[in-house]
Amino acid sequence: MNAVSGTAWRNAFRRSARFEKRRDVSSEAASERFKEVVLPHLADAMALARWLTGNQHDAEDVVQDACVRALAGIDGYSGRGARAWLLAIVRNSCFAWLAKNRPKSLVLVGDLAAVDEIGQSDDAEPALTPEAELIRKADAMLVRRALETLPIPFREVLVLRDINELSYKEIAAMLAVPIGTVMSRLSRGRGLLAIAIERAR
């Protein structure tokens, strides 16, 4: 090896070593950020995945995939709304999983667009309706079984709002729909849930 090629090799090696060191530091920083941003919200992630897939085993697969996606995209996380950010990734992972494994479950019942047009324009919680009162008084297992019968668009809004306790604004951002759409789906979902509970009694 002549002196020129030896020098070039050493310089390339040093650059490579510096790159690997930066990559290791970057990887370690991403791992730390992942722990801070994602791990505190894994229970909510599992709950959403379980509701959308229908069972624990499939939910675990979905959340594992979502965690891989979250780690890969952690550098793009803005620093606000960690739970909503993670749940959006889980939701996307769920729908990708459902499309692959249960495409028939994604078929909507009824005209969702017509329901969306009913929307309201503010973020205030509507007054307690007879349907909401019925749901509140119903047995938890009965509610769970009834909720599993709802079409996914209504089920996911109910879970995000009433179980994960996200705001209308967070849900609207996650679903990329207006707040009024979230509220109309929530109202319609609660009505359908009340009917399902009554039928199951």
Image (cartoon, rainbow, N blue to C red):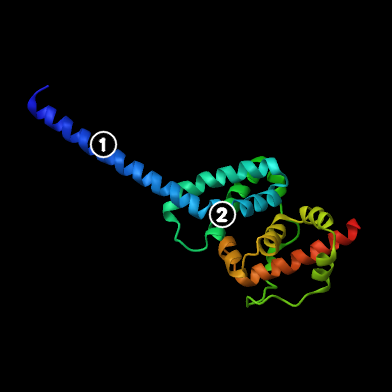
Q: Residue furthest top?
A: 1
Tell me the mark number nearer the camera, choosing from 2 and 1: 2
Q: Which corner quadrant of the image does residue 190 belong to?
A: bottom right
Is residue 88 visible in the rendered image? The answer is: yes
Looking at the image, tell me whether mark 2 or mark 1 is earlier in sequence order: 1
Q: Which corner quadrant of the image does residue 186 belong to?
A: bottom right
Q: Amino acid at mark 1?
A: Ala
183 in relation to 44, above or below: below
Q: Quadrant of the N terminus?
A: top left
Q: Position of residue 148 (x, y in %)?
A: 77, 53
Q: Which residue is mark 2?
A: 40
Q: Position of residue 84 (x, y in %)?
A: 56, 60
The numbered dot on residue 17 is 1
Lateral position of residue 179 relative to residue 190, left or right: left
Q: Residue furthest left?
A: 3
Lateral position of residue 140 relative to residue 36, left or right: right
Q: Residue furthest right?
A: 201
How far apart are the alpha carbons under marks 2 and 1? 35 Å
Task: Using the image as rendered, state which of residue 27 and residue 185 is in the foreground.
Answer: 27
Lateral position of residue 13 relative to residue 113, left or right: left
Q: Amino acid at mark 2?
A: Pro
Identify the element where label 2 is drawn.
helix
Q: Position of residue 182 (x, y in %)?
A: 65, 67
